[in-house]
Amino acid sequence: MQPKLSLLFPCLLATASATSYTEDYRPQYHFTPAKNWMNDPNGLIYHKGKYHMYFQYNPTGDVWGNISWGHAVSDDLMRWKELPVALNAFNSPAGSLNELYYSGSAVSDDALTSGLGDGKRPPLVAVYTSHYTSDMTLPSNKSVRTGQESQSIAFSTDDGLSWTEYPDNPVILEPPSQYADEYLNFRDPFVFWYGPSKHWVMTVSLPKLHKLLIYTSKNLTAWEHVSEFGPVNAVGGQWECPSLFQLPVDGKKSRTKWVMVIGLNPGGPAHAGGSGTQYVVGTFDGTTFTADANNVYDTSAPEDSVVFEDWNETSFAESSWKPTDDFVEQQPSNGQVLTLWQKGDETVGSLSSKKFTVSKKYIAFKIGCCNNPSNPETYGTTKDQETAINLIVDGQVVRSTTGVNGGDVIWASWNVASLIGKTAYIELVDRATGGWGHLDVGEIVFTDKSLPPQANWVDYGPDYYAAATYNGLSNYERVAVAWMNDWAYAVDIPTSPWRSAMSIPRVLTLETVNGRARLIQKPHPNLQTLEDRRMLYKNQWHSIRTGNLTLPVSGKALDITLTFAAGAESKMLGLNVRTDGRTYGTAIGYDFDTNEMFVNRESSGDSSFSASFPGVYYAPLPIRDGKVELRILLDWSSVEVFGGHGEETITSQIFPSDSSTDRGALGIVCVERIVLVAEPRFEARARRQCWAEGGLDDGDLAADSFLKLMRRLRTVLLQGLAILQPRYPPPPFFAYAPFTGPEWDEFAIIDELKQRRRRGQGQIRV
């Protein structure tokens, strides 16, 4: 087995700001605004050699509100320069804060179809949702109601730096008449040019109905509703932030498919109360999107399952459940779903099942309302407000799932392979008394198979939502960026003065896997421009026995590749990142029993801000060609894991402490023996920062800033593990400042620990 590790350096070109970009948890190669709240990426467009990224933004605070469009620009998707707010809710033509600028997209009107601008230069056109905060008559003389959501446009003639709102906004005032009642939930337009018919296409969401409406237009100002799509697959929460685009299958431009991407909140794959993003592959003829038959899933119970409870008994006693408090006199309400709210949300109590021996790898169940997660600090006390289904082993809650606010009942499951042979029981708890204060639970089954797909998930982690793709790239090229956060705890994460980051940009392709076109995601290749050219660490083992192996390397921003195969007795192999070796760390690895990769952040660091934050997240990943490959992007407060060739991903925030002198340490943990195939490898590369102090231009980095950076890295990298060696002879580059050009790695980090120890030399100090 060969480990390779590389360091990642920061990469944001900051504007004039007092922000140092060295605050606790500040991502170093993921985009974050200098300060304040950020959520969905909006208006992604590549225009005249620049990648523009607009985003939902609060100009005045670090919580959601005053929603405007922030703006950043990059030459390479890696080094970002934050620009002034593009669409500011404080300057709305409808009046300050009377109109909020919700999510949308941007296009270049190359054919001058809109008549906007001077009629000579193609304008950029932003299409977005206007959210009106009161009843009013707009400057266009159109009337809107409080909370109404309509679709509007703005145009730019200076390459996206400033915007003029269309005077006759909104261009779509309200949903079609058959959906007139949905005027409060009608948002997130994605627009693109459909060449064969020479018209514009818009997809826009009716979130609560799980429907996407499709409109067409010849000029971006007059729109016709032509079709709709949904509901299908995952419907556990509201549908938001759709996008629709075409990709070749297996790289063949003669064979293409269309991909519909849909945000879901809540009801994501990581936990029932969290956000998620699904996709559907199908065909599109310019007006109608049709899902491929093999992309529509049956959401029935897992195959070969043993029913533990189906609520067909007339009383809890007959079904061996022990009720407490207000549920003592109640009984199952029907033969499908146990609803614990016949007497209203103010009722509280619990139900405990008979004890059983865990004998299957999964416990699956249907769960509906409501979202009030278990908090270990209040569990079983008068402060307990949970509505959850819990698994109890040895008197401890070892698995817990809360419900989803809304009327849908969805399948969820626990991986309990590690608990086989243990005695357990299931507890249904309702301690919440306010609105959304009850619990709905359906069938409970035991099975050795994971849940059948409920959807094609773009990402199986908790922190990948509102994914958007770039317009303006070459034909069939799609790059996606998502909000790296989760509405279950987004406003509470412990960062300051900013809140939220974006995912690494991902290149999207379609490949045939088991007869089906699957979305493949890989980090954008420009990420390599942030890497040190030499490996921070590289090693190989032919086998690893049960136990822990501490790697001689530390780092907070790394690109790690782990490739391995299992022997006959292999159970699990994982990598601990950001660990102190004692109390905290994030485990990333592969479970050979279930053929799943996983991220475990139950002890990753600070989770005090939300009971929903700790968790273990799994993604199905079949072994390919006898091997498993994981690529792990580690930043100061996140991990993104790409499994196999990019067919599955898990994205997760983490908030580890920096108090330990071993911060950033790595270690391999395995259960049973792992046997590695020919040329297995474990590697990690360092990453440069995606920002430069002082707001320098286009990649310039002042020498004094570089020295400060290296001093900061000393305690992280030089734990007696590696040395810094000049790449060029004297005089050193420090003699001039700032330095420019493509050479960012004036120092190469090389692994000479053995040679230096052999010579009796110590560390080189920076």
Image (tube, rainbow, N blue to C red):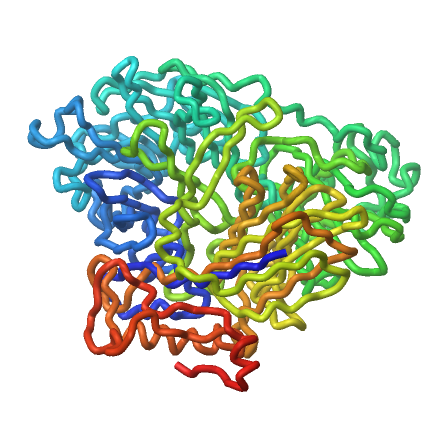
- Evaluate whether residue 347 shows in this view: no
Left/right of residue 527 with respect to residue 268 in the rendered view? left
In-image side of 249 versus 608 (left or right): left
* Residue name at image x 31 percent, y 18 percent: 216
> Which residue is located at x 72 percent, y 49 percent?
430
Residue depicted at x 31% and y 61%: 691
Which quadrant is the C terminus positioned in?
A: bottom left
Percent of width and height locating residue 471: 30, 33
Q: In this view, does 249 lie above or below 158?
A: above
Which is nearer the eye, 37 or 541? Answer: 541
Q: Which of 181 and 724 is in front in this view?
A: 724
Horizontally, residue 473 falls left or right of residue 443, namely left
Q: How many labels does the image show?
A: 0
Q: Which part of the image, by quadrant, shows the N terminus?
A: bottom right
Q: Can residue 406 be seen in this view?
A: yes
Quadrant of residue 176 in the image?
A: top left
Residue 677 spot, x, y in % from top left:
67, 48
Vertical position of residue 682 compared to residue 592: above or below: below
Residue 280 against residue 325 in the figure, above or below: above
- Residue 287, placed above or below residue 422: above
Residue 454: name its quadrant. top right
Q: Position of residue 601 (x, y in %)?
A: 61, 58
Q: Where is residue 408 in the image (x, y as percent from the top left)?
A: 62, 32
